[in-house]
Image (cartoon, rainbow, N blue to C red):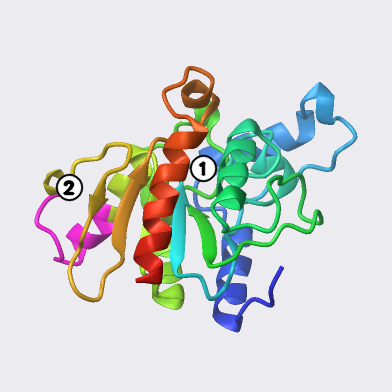
């Protein structure tokens, strides 16, 4: 992993130490103690998961939250679960990652021009963070935006899409989130000085195993993102 600038390093240390949401603290630590049988030899991460990727990234990817036995186990965004398998394979094919797999923090994965964040940094029960928990995490994502100053934001799913739009609404950039409708392949120009927003369906098993989202669908959007960044 490339050397992280001091601002991101300090921010990630703050994220890892966060205990604002007691429901999530209790759940993530309970999962880390009890474990899943297939991972009983693992020492689970069991803490908030910091961002991951290229500190000079022009593309900031915003996911939902760590999976209980994925990133909550491995300590790295979208690492150790089926959603991550799908996402990193797509990023590798599009030239944004040096390898198509993400198994653990020491597997040699490097992201190129991409940084991955999440709307909520702790694994939530049933993969459903509460509005107040998303709000508690918003400041971390805002600081990542300020540090990275990306040219594009790719929202993985409607919750991530709305979370980014809510930041713009609070800043007075837009009057309502309803002005930008979410859909797979949606794209919105947010005005001078703000990243262009792209949207895709979340790479959850519920979407990938039912065919609601396919590798070809991700490839098409990532090609558009790359063309935008290059131009």
Q: Examine the rendering and report whether any part of residue 131 can be seen.
A: no
Marks counted in the figure total 2
The nearer-to-camera label among 2 and 1 is 2
Q: Give the quadrant of the N terminus.
A: bottom right
Find the residue positioned furthest to the top.
Answer: 210
What range is drawn magenta here?
165-177
Res 40 → quadrant: top right
Q: Earlier in the sequence, mark 2 or mark 1?
A: 1
Cα–Cα gap, marks 2 and 1 = 22 Å
x and y percentages locating residue 134 in the rendered image: 39, 47
- Residue at coordinates 62% horizontally, 61% vertically from top-left? 111
Q: Which of these two is toward me, 211 or 160?
A: 211
Q: Position of residue 123 (x, y in %)?
A: 57, 39
- Disc 2 designates what residue? 180
Question: Which element is circle 1 on?
Answer: loop
Report which quarter residue 72 is drawn in: top right
Disc 2 element: loop
Residue at left 40%, top 70%?
Answer: 230
* Residue matched to label 1: 65
């Amino acid at each position: 992993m490339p050397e992280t600038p001091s601002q991101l390093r300090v921010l990630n240390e703050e994220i890892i130490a966060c205990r604002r949401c007691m429901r999530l603290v209790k759940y993530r630590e309970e999962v880390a103690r009890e474990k899943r049988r297939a991972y009983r030899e693992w020492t689970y991460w069991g803490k908030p998961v910091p961002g991951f990727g290229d500190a000079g990234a022009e593309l900031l990817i915003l996911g939902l939250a760590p999976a209980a036995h994925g990133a909550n186990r491995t300590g790295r965004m979208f690492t150790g679960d089926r959603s991550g398998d799908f996402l990193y394979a797509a990023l590798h094919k599009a030239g944004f990652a040096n390898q198509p797999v993400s198994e653990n923090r020491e597997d040699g994965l490097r992201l190129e021009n991409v940084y991955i964040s999440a709307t909520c940094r702790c694994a939530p029960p049933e993969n459903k963070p509460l509005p107040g928990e998303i709000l508690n995490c918003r400041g971390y994502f805002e600081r990542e935006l300020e540090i990275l100053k990306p040219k594009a934001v790719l929202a993985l799913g409607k919750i991530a899409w709305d979370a980014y739009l809510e930041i713009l609404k609070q800043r007075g950039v837009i009057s309502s989130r309803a002005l930008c409708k979410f859909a797979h392949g949606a794209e919105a120009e947010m005005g001078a000085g703000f990243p262009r927003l792209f949207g895709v369906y979340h790479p959850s098993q519920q979407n990938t195993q039912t065919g609601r989202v396919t590798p070809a669908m991700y490839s098409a959007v990532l090609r558009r993102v790359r063309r935008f960044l290059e131009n």
